[in-house]
Amino acid sequence: MKKLILALALSVGSFFGPANIPAIAQSSEAGWQFTTWGMSVDELKAASPVPISNSPDNCSGHTPYSNPYSTGSFDFVACYHFNANGLYHVRLQLLDLKQGAKLREALEDLYGVGRRENPLGTLNITWRSENFRVSFNDSQQAFGSIAPRRINVNYYSYQDSTGL
């Protein structure tokens, strides 16, 4: 039954779940929302409905490519990660950390029960398909009060994320 529901969700390119959380992309050639796994930075900039920023500060210094993204009641910074083969990872950083539990519940409603881990106090929930991995990360308890809390939703292509 879960496979049928997921297949139905995947068959509609811009499907949004119960709380308007973007669904996993359909195939290894697809990507997250308007992106395509393996696309170049120039292709990302051309495809994006809003301008792409070149400031590494928007994504905690991990990548300079980002833009705002909203769905339903959730607002994010979308961070785009590239390697030699192009785009392989999109990280959505939740802006309103008070919505963390609501976001986690919406993802679980959409994808079902995921694999839970708690490395170093960080809550990680992972969902996998044949071609992709989606994860929810809440660092609320990680490192005590030393590091700021972050809540992310990560979309990875298996094509370039071996070992993930």
Image (tube, rainbow, N blue to C red):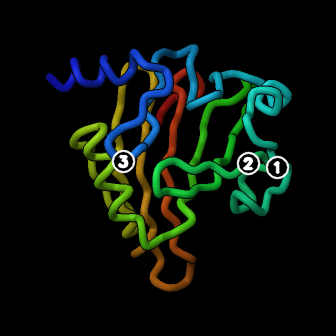
Can you say whether 130 is above or below 68 in the image? Answer: above
Would you name the residue on which mark 2 appears?
66
Tag 1, which secondary structure? loop
The reply to whether discs 1 and 2 touch (Cβ–Cβ < 8 Å) is yes
* Of 17 and 158, the residue lying toward us: 17
Q: Residue at x 81, y 43 (%)?
A: 51
Name the amino acid type tagged 1.
Ser
Tag 3, which secondary structure? loop
Q: Where is residue 121 drawn, in percent x and y?
A: 37, 69
Q: Earlier in the sequence, mark 3 or mark 1?
A: 3
Can you say whether 28 is above or below 94 in the image? Answer: above
Would you name the residue on which mark 3 appears?
19
Q: Residue at x 41, y 66 (%)?
A: 99
Q: Residue at x 52, y 28 (%)?
A: 162
Name the amino acid type tagged 2.
Ser
On the rendered structure, is 17 left or right of 64? left
Would you name the residue on which mark 1 appears?
53
Query: Depth-wise, is mark 3 or mark 1 nearer the camera?
Result: 3
The reply to whether discs 3 and 1 touch (Cβ–Cβ < 8 Å) is no
Q: Where is residue 161 drawn, in percent x and y?
A: 55, 31
Mark 1 closeness class: few <14, some 14–19, many ≥20 residues within 10 Å: some
